[in-house]
Amino acid sequence: MNVQSMSVKPVSSQSVPSQTELVGIIEASGSGEAEFFGYPEVANGLYLQQDPEEFASFVHFMATKIPPAKLTLDIGIASGGQTKFLRDYFSAEKTIVVDLGEHPLFPHWERIKKGVNSKIILEIIGDSHAESTREKLLPYANQVDFAFVDGDHSYRGLRQDIFLTKELLKLNGYMALHDTSAVADCRQVYDDLLSSRDFTLVRNYHNRFGISIWKRINNKRKPNFWNRRFGIGKI
Ligand SMILES: C[S@@+](CC[C@H](N)C(=O)[O-])C[C@H]1O[C@@H](n2cnc3c(N)ncnc32)[C@H](O)[C@@H]1O
C-alpha cells in the first residue's frame, strides 16, 4: 500500500499506556546509541535520541491532554523514530517533516516513515532556514496544530526555526522544543521564550535533555526578515 494513501488510525485516550509502561516501550524501541542514551540500539528499531523518562512524560501528556491534531510539523527528525513514536499515541491526521537528511541515522527514515500513523503530506529534505523551505511551507501558514522543533541547536538557528514555526502555527497551537535543559544555546532560547508575549510555557520535562511545550497564545509579533534570516529580535 502507498504510504500516502494509508488510513490514519485515531488514537483513543483509553489505549494510552501509563508513563511507566511508556518508558518500557521506548526502551524496547531502541536508542540511537546505547552508551549515550542508556538503553540499547535495536536492529530495525526506532533509533530514538530521547531520554526514556522524559520522553514518556511528554508523550503521555500529549496523548492525554492535547486535542487531536489535524496538521503537525517536525523540524529535525534524524531517524524519524520520535516522529513515529509520538503519533502512535497522539492523534495527528497529517504531518510535514523537515530535515537536512545528513544525520547518520537518517537512512532509517525510509523504513520508519512507512509505519508513521499520520499521512506524510510534505517531506522537505533541506535546510529549514532556506527561503525555498519557507516557500514550500507557507501554504500551511496558521494551520499547524503542533510542531516538534529539534533541528539546529545553535542559539540563532533555533530561534530561526521558532520564527518559521510561528508563521505556521495556529493560534492556541503547541510547539515542543528538545534539549532546552542540556544544550546551553537551547536553554538560552528557553529563557527568551519565558518573556515572549506570543508563547506561554505549558510543561517542562527535564530529566536529562529537556522537552518544553509552549502554547501560542497571541499573534502580537509577526516574524520579520531579520527574525527569519538571522534569528534576532523579540520572539
Ligand atoms: C537531534 S537530531 C533530531 C532527533 C530527533 N528529533 C529524535 O528525537 O530522534 C537533529 C536533526 O536536525 C537536523 N537539522 C539540523 N539542522 C538543520 C537545519 N538547518 N535544517 C533542517 N534540519 C536540520 C539534523 O539533520 C538532525 O537530523
Image (cartoon, rainbow, N blue to C red):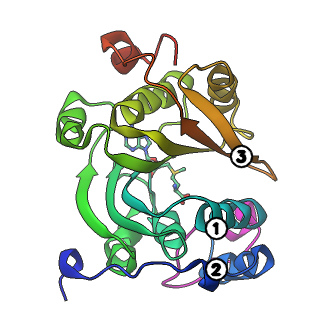
Q: Is residue 176 magenta?
A: no
Instruction: Tell me whether the residue at label 2 lies in contact with that at label 1, contact meaning CB atoms closer than 8 angstroms.
Output: yes
Viewport quadrant of the N terminus: bottom left
* Mark 3, residue position: 203
Tell me how far mark 3 sits from mark 1, CA to CA. Answer: 13 Å
Local SS, label 1? helix
Please give the name of the residue rendered at 38% of the width and 81% of the height, measured from the top-left corner: 115
The 10 Å Cα crowd at callout 1, few under 14, some 14 to 19, many 20 or more, is some
Local SS, label 3? strand
Amino acid type of disc 2?
Val
Residue 34 at x, y = what percent? 70, 70
* Mark 2, residue position: 16
- The residue stretch that appears in magenta: 34-48
Residue 134 at x, y = what percent? 24, 34
Q: Is residue 25 left or right of residue 141?
A: right
* Mark 1, residue position: 64
Amino acid type of disc 3?
Arg
The 10 Å Cα crowd at callout 3, few under 14, some 14 to 19, many 20 or more, is some
Q: Kindly report the secondary structure that dominates the magenta region of the rendered protein.
A: loop
| Residue 1 sits above or below residue 179 on the image | below
